[in-house]
């Protein structure tokens, strides 16, 4: 398998990541087309990626370019990213959207490139684009661009591809973005996340007895851990796998809307005592991640009561021993959003 090509974008004239607000902009022309760009010094990590919703004759539909809300307050458009997916029959579906994912550290974004349909990973801090091997970008028979989901590891070094085929026979892929090496995950398993160091992949599958099985695969595609998990683990989310490839943190929301955290040990099949998490009652858990110091990072949302739409995200540290939290970031989510994704989702 050939290594992926690295496409550096050396000048503003070839930059596809277009900053829409903030710093002074320079305009250049390439092949008769006008491209607007800013200097790379204004780059920042991604808070969330989003796609606008526009009112059409038949209701609301996705529209515009994929956009990145950055930590420096700016908003950027990925003008080279495919928005509307191409179906298995080659037609463009304007009622859906092509998948996009953001790495856990907010520095890398993966998407299908508009001009050639290649899966690429862009470093938003340097604007370098790395194209994945054609064998990865080429979709299995009967699968369109909208019939899959992708996710990036924390540093963007690994990309998973989950295919949604009707027969459930197409295995998921784990792609090393830097080398192009591909390993496979059984078709009946869904990718649930990476360990922070990217050395372990957590997957989930439903069994014939209506139970949930969690398994862990290492960098070589070997299964290192597996258990049919207790109900308290199977029925709650979000969850997060630690670097040891065994500890799974589980965020539990009780019937009284209180939040608790437990740690499930995949090796021993044991669950720790619950620890109450100190949070406002009006927040909902969205995403969970282990940190290098053995703590947790938690993304919480605030949602409108009438519509259920999210209007704010709060990012916090979480002490797994005491349940204490501390705010790291807080930001509003734009209105009229068709779809949006946090880093690591």
Image (cartoon, grey):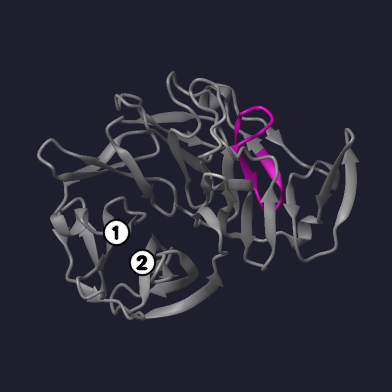
- Element assignment for label 1: loop
Residue lying at the far left of the rendered structure: 209
- Element assignment for label 2: strand
Asked whether residue 295 is in view, the answer is no
Counting labels gives 2
Residue 253, relative to residue 228: is it above or below?
below
Give residue 180's quadrant in the image.
Answer: top right
The disc label shown at residue 253, or none: none
Residue lying at the far front of the rendered structure: 57
Q: Residues within 10 Å of mark 2 (few under 14, many from 20)?
A: some
Q: Are marks 2 and 1 in contact (CB under 8 Å)?
A: yes
Residue 218: x, y in percent? 35, 40
Residue at mark 1: 237
Q: Residues within 10 Å of mark 1 (few under 14, many from 20)?
A: some
Give residue 14's quadrant in the image.
Answer: top right
The disc label shown at residue 285, or none: 2
Asked whether residue 64 is in view, the answer is yes
On whether residue 108 falls in the magenta region, the answer is no
Q: Is residue 83 left or right of residue 146?
A: right
Residue 21, relative to residue 341: is it above or below?
below
Image quarter of the N terminus: top right
Q: Name the residue rendered at 44%, 25% in the picture.
A: 143
On whether residue 122 falls in the magenta region, the answer is yes
Q: Is residue 82 left or right of residue 154?
A: right
């Amino acid at each position: 398998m050939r290594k992926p090509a690295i496409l550096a974008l050396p000048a503003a004239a070839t930059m596809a990541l277009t900053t829409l607000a903030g710093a002074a902009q320079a305009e250049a022309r390439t092949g008769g087309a006008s491209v607007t760009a800013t200097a790379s010094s204004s780059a920042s990590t991604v808070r969330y990626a989003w796609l606008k919703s526009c009112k059409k004759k038949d209701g609301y539909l996705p529209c515009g370019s994929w956009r990145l809300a950055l930590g420096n307050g700016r908003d950027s458009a990925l003008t080279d990213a495919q928005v509307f997916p191409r179906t298995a029959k080659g037609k463009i579906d304007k009622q859906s959207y092509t998948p996009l994912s953001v790495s856990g550290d907010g520095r890398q974004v993966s998407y299908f490139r508009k001009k050639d349909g290649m899966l690429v990973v862009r470093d938003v801090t340097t604007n370098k684009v790395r194209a994945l091997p054609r064998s990865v970008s080429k979709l299995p028979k009967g699968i369109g661009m909208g019939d899959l989901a992708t996710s990036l590891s924390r540093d963007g070094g690994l990309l998973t591809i989950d295919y949604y085929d009707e027969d459930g026979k197409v295995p998921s892929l784990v792609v090393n973005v830097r080398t192009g090496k591909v390993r496979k995950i059984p078709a009946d398993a869904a990718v649930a996340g990476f360990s922070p160091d990217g050395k372990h992949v957590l997957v989930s599958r439903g069994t014939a007895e209506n139970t949930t099985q969690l398994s862990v695969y290492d960098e070589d595609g070997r299964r290192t851990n597996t258990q049919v998990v207790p109900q308290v683990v199977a029925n709650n989310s979000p969850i997060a796998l630690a670097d040891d490839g065994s500890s799974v943190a589980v965020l539990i929301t009780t019937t009284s809307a209180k939040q608790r955290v437990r740690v499930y040990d995949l090796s021993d099949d044991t669950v720790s005592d619950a620890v109450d998490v100190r949070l406002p009652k009006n927040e909902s858990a969205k995403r969970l991640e282990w940190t290098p110091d053995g703590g947790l990072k938690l993304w919480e949302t605030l949602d409108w009561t009438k519509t259920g739409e999210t209007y704010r995200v709060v990012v916090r540290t979480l002490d797994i021993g005491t349940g204490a939290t501390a705010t790291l970031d807080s930001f509003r989510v734009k209105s009229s959003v068709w779809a949006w994704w946090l880093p690591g989702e």
